[in-house]
Amino acid sequence: MHKISKEQISEDFKLIQDHICKELELGDGKAQFIEDLWDRELGGGGRTRIIKDGNIIAKGGVAFSAVHGPTPEKILKKLKLEQADFYATGVSIVIHPDSPLVPIIHMNIRYFEMSNGTYWFGGGIDLTPHYVDLEDAKYFHTELKSTCDQFNKDFYPKFKEWADNYFYIAHRNETRGIGGIFFDRLTATDENDFASTFDFVKSIGYIFPKIYRYFMAKNALLPFNDEHRKWQALRRGRYVEFNLVWDAGTKFGLDTNGRTESILMSMPPQAEWEYMNIPEEGTAEAKTLEYLKKGIDWLSL
């Protein structure tokens, strides 16, 4: 099928975790990651790294895992797979900044393989600003398109639409943020294509710190007030709603008896809910809600 083993894929993912943690520490300038090594009783384990109370980062996690064993019945039914052992490895990241003017960011890259030969890559990266800034949105999507175009010109439009549909809070009729790219069940036609697909997946991992350090440097020192803080807490609440109700990664982790603390590291340090919060027309908060929609061409705004 391919020459790159699942063990090698895991090792490359570990290197990406190392690189991202180093870059985020440099960007923050204060906080450092604390590593928690863990084992999965049914097979495998991982290393979850948590950062908090920094100059810029309020709470964040960069988690690596490689787990294996019999595929749970829930997963077989949901993914319509035949019974076989599985191996799943990946890196997952969520960063919640202190400033309401620095966006929340998420990234995930993963590989799934079964003992019967079934395999695929998945992943994505998306941005959730508390306040939508069109210049920031254009930068983010331009970087993603440039990365995708190095591998396939069809990737960005296809995966951007996929992200719009995936990162959607259906019960709120709004997107979680300004999207990004999302892909799943990517396979290859031959060994060379497999290597190229893996290179694409890794490129998403390596572009992550460049993108986020840009926002850390650009926005962290911008002034904000109590109203900004209040809105940030409400938008964090929306983030929680998506992750607990709609996120497939959260469900997969829990359904495979994954480590709950690592799965739920994506939650913000604090969040709030307010009954019928409707921003006044013309405010920055109201304008942000206008952009939480599918299908926006951020590159042309």
Image (tube, rainbow, N blue to C red):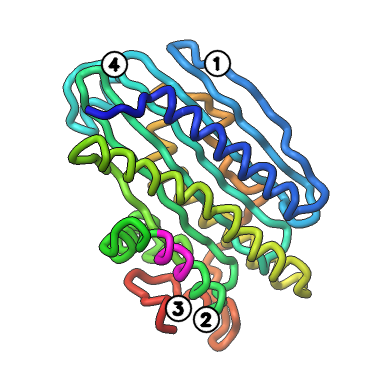
| Badge 2 amino acid | Lys
Q: Is residue 271 magenta?
A: no
Q: For the residues carrying marks 1 and 3, which lies nearer the camera in this image?
A: 1
Q: Which residue is mark 2?
A: 287
What label does residue 290 carry, if any?
3
Q: Is residue 142 magenta?
A: yes
What label does residue 85 carry, if any?
4
In the image: residue 76, left or right of residue 64: left
Residue 254: name its quadrant.
top left
Q: Residues within 10 Å of mark 1 (few under 14, many from 20)?
A: some
Q: Residues within 10 Å of mark 2 (few under 14, many from 20)?
A: some
Q: Earlier in the sequence, mark 1 or mark 3?
A: 1
List x then y, in percent, for residue 216.
69, 62
Residue 214 to residue 134: above or below: above
Residue 73 to residue 179: above or below: above
Closest to the observer: 98 or 215?
215
Q: Earlier in the sequence, mark 1 or mark 2?
A: 1
Label 2, label 4: how many angstroms apart (C-alpha)? 49 Å
Residue 182 to residue 256: above or below: below
Which residue is pictured at 35% across the width and 63% down the height? 149
List x then y, in percent, for residue 7.
43, 22
| Badge 3 amino acid | Glu
List x then y, in percent, for residue 102.
66, 65
Label 3, label 2: how many angstroms apart (C-alpha)? 5 Å
Q: Which residue is mark 1?
A: 39
